[in-house]
Image: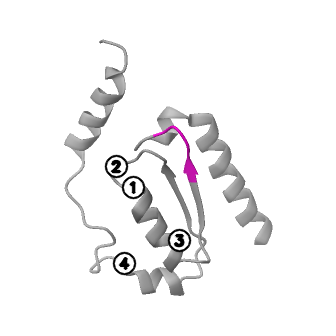
Amino acid sequence: MPAGSDKTFLYQQISDLNPPHQWLDPEQVSIQQLINTKIPIFMLAGEEDVFFMPPMIMDMYKERLPQAEFLTIPGTGHSPYFEKSEVFNTAVMRFISQIEAQA
């Protein structure tokens, strides 16, 4: 595989496995339900994600969910858990530790 094509292949495979979706399908969960929830929310996205959580969508959530925690991982696309697994894992474990400390 030529250099750089590994991510292209990965994203094509992911895309083929995922059905089309709508942002926060109102039949499943609404922004108001998220605002009212007592469940901790952590939204993590790749800075270059154009599939699921592009920056403009992340900004929309930040405005509407002030109680949530957000992290954008620089230099990653749709798969920060794969592209920068150490950064991703550290962030997730930190969030879980915070929640456990509050319990």
Residue 34 position (above or below residue 70): below
Residue 70: image x %, image y %? 58, 62
Q: Residues within 10 Å of mark 3 (few under 14, many from 20)?
A: some
Q: Nearer the viewer, residue 3 or 36?
A: 3
Residue 79 position (above or below residue 96): above
Q: Residue 15 lies in what quarter of the image?
A: top left
Residue position for label 2: 50
Q: Amino acid at mark 4?
A: Val
Report if the CB atoms under discs 2 and 1 are less than 8 Å apart: yes
Report if the CB atoms under discs 4 and 3 are less than 8 Å apart: no
How far apart are labels 2 and 3 at the CA level?
17 Å
How far apart are labels 4 and 3 at the CA level?
17 Å
Helix, strand or loop at label 1? It is loop
Q: Residue at x 56, y 69 (%)?
A: 41
- Determine whether, in the image, residue 71 is placed left or right of residue 34: right
How far apart are labels 4 and 1 at the CA level?
19 Å
Whether the magenta-drawn stretch holds residue 73 is answered as yes
Label annotation for residue 62: 3
Please state the extent of the stretch shown in magenta in the rendering: 72-76
Q: Residue 3 lies in what quarter of the image?
A: top left
Residue position for label 1: 54
Residue position for label 4: 29
Outermost residue on the right side: it is 101
Helix, strand or loop at label 4? It is loop
Q: Amino acid at mark 1?
A: Pro
Q: Residue 21 lies in what quarter of the image?
A: bottom left
Residue 69: image x %, image y %? 61, 66
Please identify, in this view, whether the residue under mark 4 or under mark 3 is nearer the observer: 3
